[in-house]
């Protein structure tokens, strides 16, 4: 049980790719934490002409200066473009360097390759900052939840959409006003579609599912949308029911041993920990057999929160930490399943946009105003196979406990029809 | 950067001390997680006659059977008595065994010795379950917060008192009714004083301060009380102000570089994450320079939540994890300071019990009913040096932002006296 204590304080010499908000944040944070025994030797940037808040000698535009430097034993990669990021980390792993990455899109799109490369070159590849930034969600999933015990995981993983929803809800702004405010405050990009339409959230969810359940998929495997169709009227209905609307990434282990996973807007009850997550914050609720409900909350984006997570990965490299992917390698990994029913609220401009025959049953309908809505239960596969639910201004929001498993549907349908007076 | 991968899956053979709710919980949890590659070889119990839900051959009443077995490489200790627990872990470390302990009282009382023993015998000693059970607070403090950056830490670390306060608040029970309910539901012991009077909370806070700030002290160094004097009338005042009352353990880095730390009842604002912590749950809010505010929430007690934390420590031993105590060994450890002022609410039966001359200034006083109260500012040292504030039925509750540093006091005092019309 001895550990080589000398070795744990190995000097880390870092080659950094990217000097945007996160890269520069990391540079600043590291200057304030000399105890780390790690230093940035060189920074690779794309635009040599841009003014930087660091000595000019630190920078290069030539990747190979970093990738071929034998003294550099850690590559930290915080660039935006997925393609170049993957080239960089592939070469770095091949050259025997450990990786710390914040590129959620790249990781989601190249997940299987990244897993293979880690085995092939036997190097650690850490990316805590890629999901929920300052919340140590990957580390906790790796170390705190055994496969058999993780009943469900629900999370708000995109700060930009959560900020917009908070403003729609609390300040009664409509979607466009809230988006402009988010952009003004730096919580949304000039092109906000990656956040707003759910792409960023589903990217993060793709690899969180690997750490939680051993599922190695593509973002396209997961049913998702964003908040682009949510209306002020939906917020009003939510308020009436004492709910909030959140863009929730969730995964639940089913009775059949598979996992249902999706990223969709949802009505959230006021006593749900996710209701507590306001503005640009993120939150993760994990329900496990032994630890019961746990909730982690923190800033999910921004220069310093992201840099602090990068820093914690760098720090972990000092003691040779690497992800074990236990749920994938030490257990039977789970499979995704769409074989469930979901209870949804759908608001829409005209009945013709909503195929009522797709619903198992409809519990509520409101047609009194221009904007109509219904609450009903439908097979989840419908969301995978068709897209009427996110077209023509139609807004779909999950009910608070949306998942109905196959074995329950008949009983619930009968009860529901009885209540509606159709059966007796 | 290579790690011996064979070695990481070392077989762990466990000697377990204690088969109460936690010990038995662990036994059950381990039966459901065979992937751990760890097994309980022997369990040492005190009372041989008691019926156990496990094979009789597993048990012994002879400590040395476990402590001298060379095959047992991990001792898990979950007994209640502090003295015997310390004897067991001392011997086990000496005999080259790794330790997982849940004995918060023992750890708090023997903190310096435990630190010394870990160095002397070079063995890991993990105790995640000893504070906040299922919340991985120690692990996160060890790995996520660098010394320079941890501005403050505030926590609800005792589920029993939090349950009682929740019931006083939400169901308007008085203290005694709420305590009886807590006992009936298994959230409070038959002798509840360890929880109710704050001893349990201050024990946990003692070693959390080591991981957060490198402070190695005794529970007696920290000013604390429990909730024993809180009245239904205090809850009514809190409600009026839209506050809740929580027993909050807190620590804050001061401008002078030292740390103020205490465990006291406090008014908590409704948007404070700690206000979200209801019933038997625990919560920790960490404010750091880079990661900003983070909040961890989960079950703080109970058989399975505690067992799951013990299990995560056992799991960590497989890859030779040990606490580094970075804030203690790699930085200049912080010192405790009482050199602050605090803003407090005090309710009492008679003015004669409250030495008004101790206050710098008093902002509010209410004497209209049998029960009187005031809000004022006093030197924190008064709470350390005297005990009138917890005697004669007097109830002291901190204001939401209670700490006023030395350099601010003069300015604030002047302003306060101006407002009162005494100066101008």
Image (spheres, coloured by chain):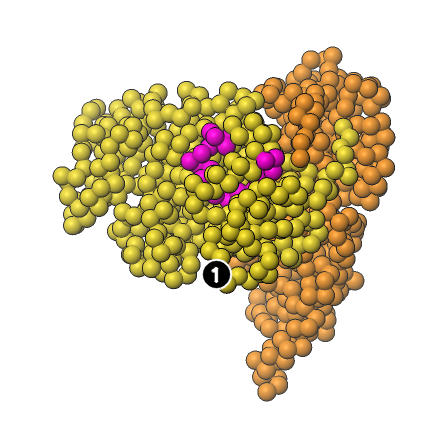
Chain colours: A yellow, B orange
Instruction: Give the position of the C terminus of chain A as an image quadrant.
Output: top left
Residue indicated by mark 1: A50
Location of residue A155 (image quadrant): top left
Compare residues A223 and A3 and report the one nearer the observer.
A3
Above-or-below relation of A317 to A148: below
Residue found at the very far bottom of the displayed protein:
B424
Which residue is drawn at the image coordinates 39% and 54% (left, top)? Answer: A188
Which residue is drawn at the image coordinates 60% and 29% (left, top)? Answer: A122
Q: Is residue A409 left or right of residue A52?
A: left
Q: Secondary structure at mark 1?
A: loop
Q: Position of residue B128 (x, y in %)?
A: 67, 37
Above-or-below relation of A145 to A36: above
Chain to which mark 1 belongs: A
Q: Position of residue A251 (x, y in %)?
A: 43, 32
Part of the protein shown in magenta: A95-115
Q: Residues within 10 Å of mark 1 (few under 14, many from 20)?
A: few
In this view of the protein, can residue A43 be seen by the observer? yes
């Amino acid at each position: 049980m001895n550990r080589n204590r000398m070795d744990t304080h190995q000097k880390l010499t870092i080659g950094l790719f990217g000097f945007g908000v996160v890269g520069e944040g990391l540079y600043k944070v590291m200057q304030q934490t000399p105890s780390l025994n790690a230093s940035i030797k060189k920074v690779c940037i794309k635009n040599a002409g841009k003014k930087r808040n660091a000595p000019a000698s630190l920078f290069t535009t030539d990747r190979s200066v970093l990738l071929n430097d034998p003294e550099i034993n850690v590559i930290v990669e915080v660039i935006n473009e997925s393609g170049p990021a993957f080239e960089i980390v592939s070469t770095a792993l091949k050259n025997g360097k450990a990786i710390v990455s914040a590129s959620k899109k790249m990781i989601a799109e190249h997940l299987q390759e990244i897993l293979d490369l880690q085995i092939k070159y036997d190097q650690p590849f850490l990316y805590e900052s890629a999901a929920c930034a300052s919340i140590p969600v990957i580390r906790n999933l790796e170390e705190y939840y055994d496969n058999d015990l993780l009943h469900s995981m629900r999370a708000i993983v995109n700060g930009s959409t959560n900020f917009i929803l908070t403003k729609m809800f609390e300040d009664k702004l409509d979607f466009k006003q809230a988006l402009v405010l988010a952009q003004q405050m730096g919580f949304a990009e000039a092109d906000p579609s990656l956040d707003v339409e759910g792409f960023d959230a589903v990217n993060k969810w793709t690899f969180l599912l690997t750490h939680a359940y051993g599922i190695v998929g593509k973002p396209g495997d997961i049913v998702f949308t964003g908040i682009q169709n949510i209306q002020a009227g939906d917020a009003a209905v939510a308020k009436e029911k004492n709910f909030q609307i959140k863009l929730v990434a969730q995964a639940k282990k089913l009775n059949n041993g598979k996992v249902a996973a999706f990223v969709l807007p949802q009505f959230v009850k006021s006593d749900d920990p996710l209701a507590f997550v306001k503005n640009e914050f993120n939150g993760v609720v994990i329900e496990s057999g032994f630890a019961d409900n746990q909730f982690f909350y923190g800033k999910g984006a921004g220069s310093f929160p992201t840099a602090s997570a990068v820093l914690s990965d760098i720090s972990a490299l000092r003691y040779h930490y690497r992800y074990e992917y236990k749920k994938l390698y030490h257990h039977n990994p789970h499979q995704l399943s769409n074989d469930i029913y979901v209870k949804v609220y759908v608001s829409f401009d005209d009945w013709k946009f909503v195929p009522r025959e797709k619903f198992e049953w409809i519990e509520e309908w409101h047609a009194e105003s221009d904007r109509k809505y219904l609450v009903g239960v439908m097979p989840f596969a419908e969301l995978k196979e068709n897209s009427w639910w996110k077209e023509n201004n139609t807004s779909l929001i999950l009910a608070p406990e949306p998942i109905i498993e196959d074995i329950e549907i008949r009983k619930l349908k009968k009860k529901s029809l009885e209540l509606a007076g159709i059966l007796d």
